[in-house]
Amino acid sequence: MSALGALIRRDIRIAVRVGGGALIGVLFFLTVVVLMPFALGPDLALLARLGPAILWLGALLASLLTLDRLFTADHDDGSLDLILMSRTPLELACAAKALAHWLAAGVPLIVATPVLGLLLNLDGPATLAVALTLLAGTPALTFTGMIGAALAVTLQRGGLLLAVLVLPLSIPVLIFGVAASNAAILEQGALTFSTPFSILCALSLASLVIGPFAAAASLRHGLD
Amino acid sequence: MRLSGRNLRCLRGGREVFAGLDFDAVAGEAVAIVGPNGAGKTSLLRLIADLLMPAEGTITLEGGDGEMTVAEQAHYLGHRDAMKPALTVTENLTFWADFLGGPPADPAACIAAVGLSHAAALPAGFLSAGQRRRLSIARLLTVRRPIWLLDEPTAALDLVSQRVFAGLMTDHLATGGLIIAATHGPLGIPARELRIGGEA
């Protein structure tokens, strides 16, 4: 397993170096959320009501922004050829790359959420609920996004295609992520926090399994 | 150990690159694939490395590790050097040594073998084309693989580096290795010629 450890360490190291792109997602997230109050106006109650949805949309778009480089960078410099040839199963290598991407680009989004929650007039428990749903839901975004990244790997400008391919797959995550956050904030009797949150966790777990296999199959098929 | 291909046919984008190609390579021998541009030298190497599917024909390895595919027992040195510009020379090489697995050689010794010790702490993005080539060659030394598949290995190398590389290839052949190289220029070691696609 040291091969996978080496792959994860390398990808994180590249992501945090100059030009690596780990913080680009956070900056984009920050920009989207900071602009929202200007567009919606100073209605604090409205901001608080829309807060979870805005944070989730921002995190979803920010995670898409950096996903297109997941395999393209390795394809362009020839590393992908060696990864395909190696004794490590391609499915595990894909999973390791997605995990590294989530650690480098997904976790900073979750860490930034409490700060951004302040800008949207969310109180402490509400921000915590959103951060918790992001923690449970962003792995699903990364691992389903990986399928699109693998399909678009040989295209020169696959970023837009990636978004078109991946966004429909992200809709369930968005629905249940926002639903769980809202349920935690509003505490309505009809809808509890645990139901949508369990479905969100299930989506993440399913994508952890399906994503690497689909991405590996698509990489093998796309050999050129 | 004997690596052989029979009746190989290769299609790229629906166009036939070559057909009915046979080749043999035995341990301790270097085979130089020669031919004009577009004859399919790189395609043949990628077929052997399992990075392309042959439209027809088979590639078999006798006397290797039966548990592993040909690709898993091979080093592939392609046009692209598989080194990350943001990582230093040592970090790049240590990664490949760890990722490729097996008992790794000391990365510092591999870097010294290709004469890059003075640049070991430099990000790979600052290296010249020839130095990047030498760094890729150092990758072949990090982990022992009996089959070396080399695509234009001497391109961008100066005369001194070409001699050093010829020495490394001779050592590899002497320890029972096997080299298949696509090349236009002289390889620097005695090699059997495999001509594809007519006269260059």
Image (cartoon, grey):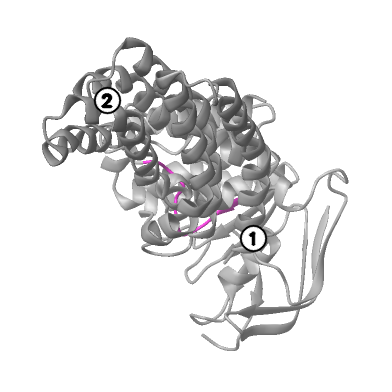
Identify which amino acid the numbered label 1 is placed on: Leu
Q: Quadrant of residue B181?
A: bottom right
Q: Horizontal and vertical percent for residue B126?
A: 26, 41
Q: Does A101 sit above or below residue B45?
A: above
Q: Is residue B79 magenta?
A: yes
Q: Is residue A136 visible?
A: yes
Compare residues B53 and A102 and report the one nearer the observer.
Answer: A102
Q: Say left or right for A1 vs B167.
A: right
Specify the farthest residue to the top: A124
Using the image, tell me which numbered label, if any, was put on residue A48: 2
Q: Say left or right for A138 vs A36.
A: right
Residue, x 22% and y 21% (percent of image)? Answer: A121
Main SS, magenta residues: loop
Compare residues A165 and A132 and report the one nearer the observer.
Answer: A132
The subunit carrying tag 1 is B
Q: Which residues, given as a range, are shown in magenta?
A: B75-84
Q: CA distance from mark 1 to mark 2?
A: 53 Å
The residue under label 1 is B51
Q: Horizontal and vertical percent for residue A92?
A: 66, 37
